[in-house]
Amino acid sequence: MLMLGLGAAGAASAQNLAGDWQGTLKAGEAELRLVLHITKADDGSWKGTLDSVDQGANGIPVTSISLKESKLKFAVDEVKGSYEGTVNAGATEISGTWTQSQALPLDFKRATTPVKTEHAPAKASDIDGAWMGTLDTGAAKLRVVFHITNTADGLIATMDSLDQDMKGLPVTKVTRDGSSLKLELKQIGGVFEGTISKDLASVTGTWSQAGNNLPLQLKRVKDSAELERPRPQNPAKPYPYREEDVSFENSAAGIRLAGTLTIPPGKGPFPGMILIAGSGAHDRDEALMGHRPFLVLSDYLTRRGIAVLRYDKRGVGESEGNYATATTADFADDAEAGLAYLTTRAEVDRRKIGLVGHSEGAMIAPMLAARDSSVAYIVMMAGPGIPGDELLVEQTLLIAEANGQTNETAEKAAGEERIILSLVKDEADSAVLEKKLREQLTGQMPEAQIGAAIKSTSSPWFRYFISYDPATALRKVKCPVLAVVGSKDLQVPPEENIPAIRKALQDAGNQKFEIDELPGLNHLFQTAKTGSPAEYAQIEETISPTALEKIAAWIAKQ
């Protein structure tokens, strides 16, 4: 449930809306406190901004706002949200509904005093600072950190979930009564209650969320380095090669993409390579779960004489464009623009430019190679060979089993996933699809999560992905191909995908391909125990040296 972006301009009315309005959006156990600030412009129109207090988002401008015969309406185009309500006779209350993937009641009351969303500093309390603990959910161990600060208005706090790449989630309410401490996060329906030790070094208590109660002990963080898991493969500067921030244009999309080009020492020209990231809003390092795989990979390959281009996905980091509306085909066009750019660099041998893609990026690399004969070779890291809908069902089954579920429970989850995917593939009407998805998901997950799930599964990217068959492009690839898959990859399982990749390349008449299943490695090519995504953040290794050497040695032969 994401809020919002609300903004400006509507007709004047006899009712005076000017001032601050407070409301709380509730979905199941989750709550979001909202503050609507309305002012009247000189021309009589209304203008407004919105604060989503529990998400730390203040001063968001309103898209449109109008008041007619006590009916207030405003829209939020950016998040496809809207509000309709009725202002009472005294203009002290607004009763209505917020609609964003689902309709939720939302009432505002006029604030009698200005609402404070900023807090003046005060002398530090004896529990100010960072407190870290680990939640053992059974399926994963998640490190959480609470940052507590004393202010003139009392204690405030934020929460980080380090292994979920979530930082700065505002704590709704902090209550301290002697040695008792309570931290409430109503926006996710979570509460921590504990007892502060006499030496002020730990807090022992319980985390409660969605009907589950888990023990959680927080310990005071003395050194900020404790908040970061070791990532020993991250290279340290100065590098023994040149690093340059670059940008290139996808003229068809009208966007400019930003990235980093690393160039080996010497005169050159050098073989060139483009790194294409997997699914998700990745930056040029493909950063996730505290790891930076593309930083490690580009460093490894550049030290071995290859010029490497890696870039932020459209709408991410310094790249232009809208990530939310893009499909795999759009990302392929962006990679093709990167290929065109690399051919303009004097340091790069344009006859020896290859593509290395990971996961979704390993779907994109064959798409480009199939339509551009200048691609010298491609490396598919954990690339799928079966259609997206089949892949996701198999993922669901294997990950559920790896996380400790019985085969019967896992099969049931896979069956439910299959139903969802069929609905998305078969229903083109978005409104009808939303209704069907809501009926299917109700009871399967907390109400607060259903809206986000519907938005995700009905997105342009998702619709494209589940309908795309990677074999279509692979059957047209004539250049050399290296496909590597980890034996413990649960997201692109080798048992189903390796045969499909091999058959498609054979159908293409390609005599220059190699397919390797690397023992003991997961989807990120880390040495893993089970292969579950829950392990990714906990493993210190970013990419196994075995995988790095296999890729580098194969490229050297091309």
Image (cartoon, rainbow, N blue to C red):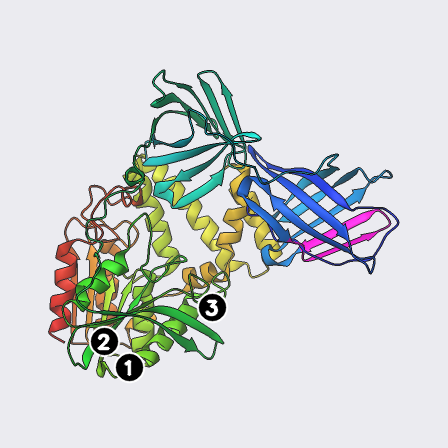
Give the Cα separation between the discs numbered 2 and 3. 24 Å
Q: Earlier in the sequence, mark 2 or mark 3?
A: 2
The residue singled out by tag 1 in the image is 345
Kind of residue at badge 1 = Arg
Q: Which corner quadrant holds the N terminus? A: top right
In the displayed structure, does residue 162 sit left or right of residue 306? right
> As displayed, is residue 36 above or below residue 350?
above
Label 2, on which residue? 272
Q: Residues within 10 Å of mark 1 (few under 14, many from 20)?
A: few
Foreground: disc 1 or disc 2: 1
Seen at 34% across and 36% down, the residue is 142
Q: Nearer the viewer, residue 460 or 157?
A: 157
Rounded to the nearest whole Å, what is the CA distance between mark 1 and mark 3? 22 Å
Left or right of 356, for residue 458: right
Q: Quadrant of residue 265?
A: bottom left
For residue 10, above or below residue 246: above
Please identify the quarter of the rendering in which residue 126 is found: top left
Q: Earlier in the sequence, mark 1 or mark 2?
A: 2
Judged from the image, the secondary structure of the residue bearing numbered disc 2 is strand
Magenta segment boundaries in residue numbering: 61-75
Asked if the residue at tag 2 contacts the one at tag 1, i.e. Cβ–Cβ closer than 8 Å, the answer is yes
* Residue type beneath disc 2: Gly
Q: Is residue 67 magenta?
A: yes
Majority secondary structure of magenta residues? strand
Asked if labels 3 and 2 touch by Cβ distance under 8 angstroms, the answer is no
Which residue is rendered at x = 78% and y = 57% of the image? 41
Q: How many marks?
A: 3
